[in-house]
């Protein structure tokens, strides 16, 4: 293992995060705070409890997931897209590092950033609503797994994207709707049976459901199914990245 | 001396059938400077990108100090430093941090004093905490070199190091290359300037249309590259050459109105004086004179033809 190589990539990426602290950190916090003001305080007080949890508290896990998923994808994709875009990727391709080390460095840094943001939002939400986390250990594990999986997805996007437009397109057209319709703001059980079945094809449902279970002990699907879903998704992304580096797709001519 | 870099039957085809490299064989010894000379699009960059692992190849084998660059890529790549033609640097990063990154990426333990020494050598030490976007073009180019040297490589690739560079920086670059060679680093550089190859290389390889036409000691190649042709137009038709001129490589043209003389600028005496005075002595009247230097293209053409024979 080239530990110095992993560390170099990781440190370099984290340094980028601190250089752009305002945009990478302050903006998601402000956005989430606004959600809490609108859905938690203003509208939420008029919505009845969901499975015995006040609506304001109910949306906390969903909001954290919403931010963490979008952040992981954007961090993961930008980290590898940027060197490709400005040409510094030559150094990475000629370095004695294998795909797994590159992924550990880039995806590790991207996941760290979004985990940090997720925790800050968790902290912020305590200012607006009251809630307890029943399984804090499992909650953190779930959060980490989500950060890593979506940073991996972002990494694939970053390699695939040929320009900034494509880089924005997939998150905008696919991921944001998936997260919004994945139960961030509602329980799947509130839907009609047809849409409940449709929702089960949305992988994000399993994430939000599992994450919410760690908070309140309530969920749409079982926690085991949720964990299995995250692991399968992560494995799939890793397999795709392994193939990308083996074949050189979009990287080596 | 042992062969440091060996390339055997290296070929590269693109999916559209374009042959970027055609069965290249090359041996490079330790601490020598090899210049790859060729016109734009000849395959120089492709060849070095392939050795560095940036580009894939279709068939063949490359080893560096005995390590296969595919099977044993870690050992091989650790020894290689590469300065690309295009300056690609992270604008917002500081000089020192980008060097730390490069060194780490190539698996070396941090060593700031070495990196500072390197910056000193490249007259960049006072810029170590500056952001890269504050540097001038010449400084950025030197920084690219510092990055390539940050992990103490034994083989350095310089892709067109002096393209678009002013005279002073070009001379600095040449000094640096010699200095590196003296420290035991093997340097392979690409260029399309004959003068550059002449100035610093020990051996010169000529590459065109993906083929390595020849690799020769610089001295003998320069001898060949220094050929010029003198055309002497005559006032009157000449039936045959004066005997005095039979010692020279001189040909009477088919129209018997001009003489063609091939000579070498690099040999001490060109023989032009003697030829002209012999002609005058023989009463031949000269109408006009014209000299023509073989262009790089001519040289390529003649080399291709030679190889074809």
Image (tube, grey):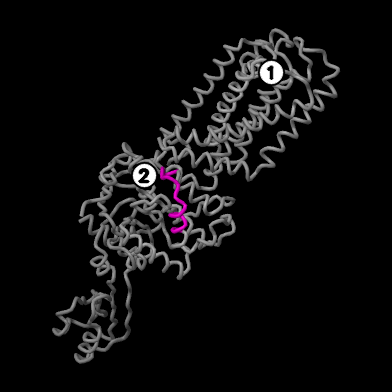
| Magenta segment | B105-118
Task: Name the secondary structure under disc 1.
Answer: loop
Q: Dot 1 falls on which chain?
A: A
Residue A239, how many percent across, how many down?
46, 25
Residue A113, how many percent across, how many down?
61, 34
Q: Quadrant of residue B114?
A: bottom left
Q: Nearer the viewer, residue A36 or A120?
A: A120
Q: Which residue is pictured at 44% across the width and 29% down the height?
A: A243
Q: Nearer the viewer, residue B297 or A215?
A: A215
Whether the magenta-drawn stretch holds residue B113 is answered as: yes
Q: Nearer the viewer, residue A180 or A26?
A: A26
Q: Nearer the viewer, residue B82 or B229?
A: B82
Whether the magenta-drawn stretch holds residue B38 is answered as: no
Q: Are marks 1 and 2 in contact (CB under 8 Å)?
A: no
For the N terminus of chain B, give its image quadrant: bottom left
Q: Which residue is pictured at 28% across the width and 44% down the height?
A: B63
Total labels drawn: 2
Q: Residues within 10 Å of mark 2 (few under 14, many from 20)?
A: many
Of the numbered discs in the image, which one, if any, rests on residue A133?
Answer: 1
Q: Nearer the viewer, mark 1 or mark 2?
A: 1
Alpha-carbon span between mark 1 and mark 2: 49 Å
Q: Which residue is mark 2?
A: B77
Of the numbered discs in the image, which one, if any, rests on residue B166?
Answer: none
């Amino acid at each position: 293992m080239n530990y110095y190589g992993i560390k170099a990539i990781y440190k370099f990426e984290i340094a980028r995060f601190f250089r752009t602290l305002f945009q990478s950190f302050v903006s998601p916090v402000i956005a989430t705070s606004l959600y809490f003001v609108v859905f938690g305080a203003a509208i939420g007080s008029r919505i009845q409890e969901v499975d015995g949890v006040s609506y304001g508290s109910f949306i906390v896990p969903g909001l954290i997931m919403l931010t963490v998923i979008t952040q992981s994808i954007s961090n993961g994709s930008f980290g590898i897209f940027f060197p490709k875009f400005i040409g510094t990727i030559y150094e990475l391709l000629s370095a004695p590092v294998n795909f797994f080390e590159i992924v550990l460095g880039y995806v590790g840094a991207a996941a760290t950033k979004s985990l940090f943001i997720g925790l800050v939002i968790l902290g912020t939400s305590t200012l607006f609503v009251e809630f307890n986390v029943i399984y804090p250990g499992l909650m953190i594990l779930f959060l980490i797994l989500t950060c890593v999986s979506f940073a991996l997805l972002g990494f694939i996007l970053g390699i695939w994207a040929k320009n900034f437009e494509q880089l924005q397109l997939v998150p905008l057209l696919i991921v944001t709707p998936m997260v919004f319709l994945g139960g961030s703001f509602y329980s799947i059980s509130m839907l009609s049976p047809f849409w409940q079945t449709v929702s089960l094809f949305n992988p994000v449902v399993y994430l939000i459901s599992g994450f919410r279970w760690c908070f309140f002990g309530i969920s749409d699907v079982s926690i085991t199914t949720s964990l299995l879903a995250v692991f399968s998704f992560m494995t799939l992304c890793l397999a795709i990245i392994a193939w990308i580096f083996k074949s050189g797709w979009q990287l080596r001519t | 001396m042992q062969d440091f870099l060996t390339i055997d039957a290296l070929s590269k085809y693109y999916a559209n059938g374009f042959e970027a490299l055609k069965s290249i064989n090359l041996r490079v010894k330790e601490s020598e400077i090899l210049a790859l000379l060729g016109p734009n699009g000849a395959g120089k960059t492709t060849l070095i990108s392939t050795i560095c692992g940036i580009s894939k190849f279709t068939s063949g084998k490359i080893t560096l100090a005995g390590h296969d660059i595919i099977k044993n890529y870690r050992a091989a790549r650790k020894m290689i430093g590469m300065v690309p033609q295009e300056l690609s640097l992270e604008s917002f990063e500081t000089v020192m941090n980008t060097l730390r990154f490069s060194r780490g990426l190539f698996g070396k333990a941090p060593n700031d004093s070495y990196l500072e020494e390197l910056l000193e050598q490249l007259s960049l030490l006072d810029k170590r905490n500056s952001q890269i976007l504050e540097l001038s073009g010449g400084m950025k180019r030197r920084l690219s070199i510092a990055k390539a040297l940050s992990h103490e490589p034994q083989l350095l690739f310089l892709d067109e190091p002096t393209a678009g560079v002013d005279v002073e920086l070009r001379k600095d670059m040449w000094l640096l290359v010699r200095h590196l060679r003296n420290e035991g680093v093997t340097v392979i550089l690409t260029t399309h300037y004959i003068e550059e190859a002449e100035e610093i290389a020990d051996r010169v390889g000529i590459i065109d249309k993906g083929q390595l036409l020849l690799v020769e000691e610089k001295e003998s190649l320069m001898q060949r590259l220094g050929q010029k042709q003198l055309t002497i137009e005559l006032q009157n038709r000449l039936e045959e050459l004066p005997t005095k001129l039979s010692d020279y490589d001189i040909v009477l043209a088919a129209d018997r109105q001009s003489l063609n003389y091939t000579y070498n600028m690099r040999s001490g005496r060109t023989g032009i004086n003697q030829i002209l005075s012999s002609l005058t002595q023989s009463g031949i009247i000269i109408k006009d004179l014209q000299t023509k230097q073989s262009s790089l293209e001519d040289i390529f053409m003649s080399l291709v033809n030679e190889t074809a024979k």
